Image: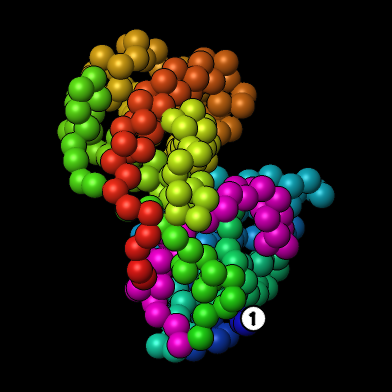
């Protein structure tokens, strides 16, 4: 599905006045303006890709300047909220909600939205100005199941039926114990536990965890955490681990911590060393969660 439009922007300092040419799509126009507003001149074309499943969302930008591709910074909470509102507004009782949305802009103010209800989504990491995924991460079964519960469909694509019908892993409840007990009160490590369980579910073969070990799980979890956080969030995660006595005191790298963690880990030796220091802790968490596997099958 495609929706096209245009907007007229008149500005004095930072005050913008918008006239939408398609009143039926006011929220799309608002998102287009928010995206236009974040782009620093000069630029020629830009794109945004939003993927949302359950309670998880990813939003990435790309901008073309003098023929070169670059990013356009990290999304704000207001931008995430606007895309989430758009998805909810467009959801249909029988069709569910779209998985992937693309916004394509050019500097003249013309824009076009594309919505994909049926193709299997992937979490965008880097995109091009046509909304294509240059780098991405696969979505996991639990997110798809959560999303289908929230937005049920009368007809499901074949790939979705296969993904949600696959055997999944059940876990027993339980607080972290032993040397990990110091992480119990950490919300940051609570999220890591959730990612770890989702990773085990995703890596399990036919619902069986027999062939999984903590090293494989921890490696995947580290990639997920680096790909989903900003540097500041990762530092907070490691500070909590240090407070629990699981790693050495954290020396904050002299980098822009508002940048994505995976970028910092690739560019800065000190940040990379901090990521490496996280691996033994992630392996201990993975071993704990593997020990909590309760059952290999669960109905939707």
Magenta span of residues: 125-154
Quarter location, residue 235: top left
**Residue name at image x 35 percent, y 68 percent:** 299
Quadrant of the frame with the N terminus: bottom right
Residue 236 appears in the figure: yes
Quarter location, residue 298: bottom left
Above/below status of 279 relative to 131: above
Residue 259 appears in the figure: no
Quarter location, residue 159: bottom right
Is 138 one of the magenta-colored residues? yes
Left or right: 273 as drawn, with respect to 54: right
**84 or 205, nearer to the observer:** 205
Give how far across and how far down residue 231 sits, in percent.
45, 31
Quadrant of the frame with the C terminus: bottom left
**22 or 112, nearer to the observer:** 112
Give how far across and how far down residue 297 sits, in percent.
37, 60
**87 or 135, nearer to the observer:** 135
**48 or 119, nearer to the observer:** 119
- The residue wearing badge 1 is 2
Around disc 1, counting alpha carbons within 10 Å, would you say few (fewer than 14), some (14 to 19), or many (20 or more)? Answer: few
Give how far across and how far down residue 277 sits, in percent.
44, 17
Left or right: 106 as drawn, with respect to 221: right
**Residue name at image x 57 percent, y 53 percent:** 138
Give how far across and how far down residue 237 sits, in percent.
34, 29
**Residue name at image x 47 percent, y 32 percent:** 213
Left or right: 130 as drawn, with respect to 234: right
């Amino acid at each position: 599905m495609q929706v096209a439009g245009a907007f007229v922007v008149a500005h004095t300092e930072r005050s913008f006045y918008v006239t939408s040419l398609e009143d039926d799509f006011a929220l799309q126009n608002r998102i287009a303006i928010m995206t236009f507003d974040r782009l620093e001149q000069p630029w020629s074309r830009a794109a945004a890709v939003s993927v949302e499943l359950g309670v998880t969302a990813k939003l990435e930008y790309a901008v073309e300047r003098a023929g070169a591709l670059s990013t356009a910074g990290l999304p704000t909470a207001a931008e995430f909220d606007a895309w989430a509102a758009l998805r909810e507004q467009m959801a249909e009782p029988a069709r569910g909600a779209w998985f992937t949305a693309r916004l394509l802009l050019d500097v003249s103010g013309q824009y076009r939205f594309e919505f994909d209800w049926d193709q299997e989504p992937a979490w965008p990491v880097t995109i091009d100005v046509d909304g294509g995924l240059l780098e991405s991460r696969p979505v996991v079964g639990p997110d798809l199941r959560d999303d289908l519960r929230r937005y049920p469909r009368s007809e499901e694509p074949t790939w979705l039926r296969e993904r949600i019908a696959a055997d999944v892993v059940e876990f027993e409840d339980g607080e972290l114990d032993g040397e990990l007990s110091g992480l119990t009160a950490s919300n940051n490590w609570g999220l890591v536990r959730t990612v770890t369980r989702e990773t085990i579910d995703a890596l399990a073969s036919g619902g069986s965890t027999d062939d999984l070990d903590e090293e494989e799980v921890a490696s995947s979890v580290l990639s997920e955490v680096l790909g989903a956080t900003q540097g500041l969030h990762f530092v907070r995660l490691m500070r909590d681990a240090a407070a629990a006595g699981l790693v050495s005191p954290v020396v904050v790298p002299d980098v822009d911590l508002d940048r994505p963690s995976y970028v910092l880990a690739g560019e800065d030796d000190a940040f990379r060393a901090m990521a490496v220091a996280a691996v033994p802790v992630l392996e201990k968490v993975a071993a704990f969660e593997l020990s909590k596997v309760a059952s290999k099958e669960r109905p939707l």
